Image (cartoon, helix red, strand yellow):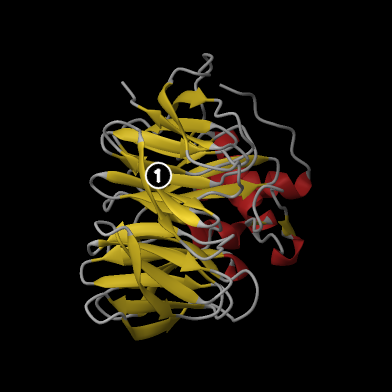
Amino acid sequence: MTDRPTFDPFERRIAAELERYVQPATDPMATSAIAEAAMRPRGLGVRARNLSRPRRFLLLGIAAALLLPATYLGVGSLRPPTPDLDNQVQPVSRTQVGAPVAPRWFAADDQSLWVHEPTSLVRVDLATSAVTGQVPLSWMDYGYVTTGAGSVWQSDFENNVLVRIDPVAGKVVARIPVGSSPEGVAVTAGSVWVANEGDGSVMRIDPATNRVVATIPVGPPGASGPQIMTAGPGGVWVGVENIQSVVRIDAATNRVGLSVPLDGPVASDGKEVWIGIDAGGTSLVARIDPVSGKVITTVDLETQGICGLAVGLGSVWVADGGLTRIDLATGRIVAHLDTGGDCGNVVVAGGAVWVTADGQPYVLRIAPP
């Protein structure tokens, strides 16, 4: 167990409040209550950028006060085990997909991995790791990808459209006008959702008609609005950087049903919700109760910078300048892989984990034990 650090008077006050308030996983505490107890002025938050991505997440003083001391105190949180975990998972294939671009996004359906390139989507077979085709696109430096409703969906940040691709025909079948600077995309039963960063909104689209059927405000318009989004319990979850929160939009009401005051990428397997947080000099991953928004567990990654998360195969997978594996059952880090890049993205599909490294021309396939 790591010794407790030496706190200044303000930090001792925070530590005392955390001792009092942070609960074990069986009785989690709302993050808002911990934040109020810490009383860190929100104006002290700083913004950091990873040079490989055009946008980074706000690094809040409040998040550092909330979560970093909790990892030292060891109550309701878990630290990595001490043995050397490097390279205990190994890639079984490395597939060249194009130019060494950054950032790079991808998504998967039942048969293929779809990898973003500036002028195309590259199709990789999940079973063989072979490139099996490309879908030509207009130049698109920035745009997220997802699959569902029989299609591949890519947001076009510069042109304010959502591109719909037929995976069988391998061609674009619709370009749907959306809001300003679209980013994250998610699919639920009968709906496609897109996060409009510039408008501070999320749009719901009916894939039967390719029409917007609802627009849900989630934050103020302007820079650093809603970005990374995932389908999860109750609807869709989206990180909204300029309000320093992850919000849940309830599919039944088209309204924000929950706001979690943690800022970072969010991922879900449909049951659990995890949020990555860059807090001060370290990065953390927090498991959230999807009903109450309380923090159940935090894991200290002992690194800086989280670019993507995925949940599957009994683990949380974190793209953090490599690939870190967290065991879902214990909440402990069990492996780390150097992917050869500065950051990247990660998805679980076809019984394997696929990871990119920004600035590299390949994707890696990992078959975890």
Q: Secondary structure at mark 1?
A: strand
- Badge 1 local density, few (<14 within 10 Å), some, or many (20+)? many
Instruction: Tell me where residue 219 appears, x and y as whole percent.
Output: 54, 77
Q: Is residue 82 visible?
A: yes
Q: The residue under label 1 is which amino acid type?
A: Ala
Figure quadrant of residue 312: top left
At horizontal 29% and vertical 37% (from top left) the residue drawn is 126
* 153 versus 19 height, above or below: below
> Which quadrant of the rendered structure holds the N terminus?
top right
Using the rendered view, name the quadrant where residue 190 is placed: bottom left
Q: Is residue 42 left or right of residue 311?
A: right
Which one is nearer the viewer's eye here, 138 or 231? 138
User: Which image quadrant: the C terminus?
Assistant: top left
Q: Is residue 166 left or right of residue 339?
A: left
Residue located at (58% from left, 80% from top): 220
Q: Which residue is tagged 1?
A: 310
For this orientation, the residue located farthest to the top is 83
**Farthest residue toward the right?**
8
Note whether residue 25 is visible: no
Residue 115 horizontal/vertical position (percent): 44, 48
Q: Nearer the viewer, residue 212 or 270?
A: 212
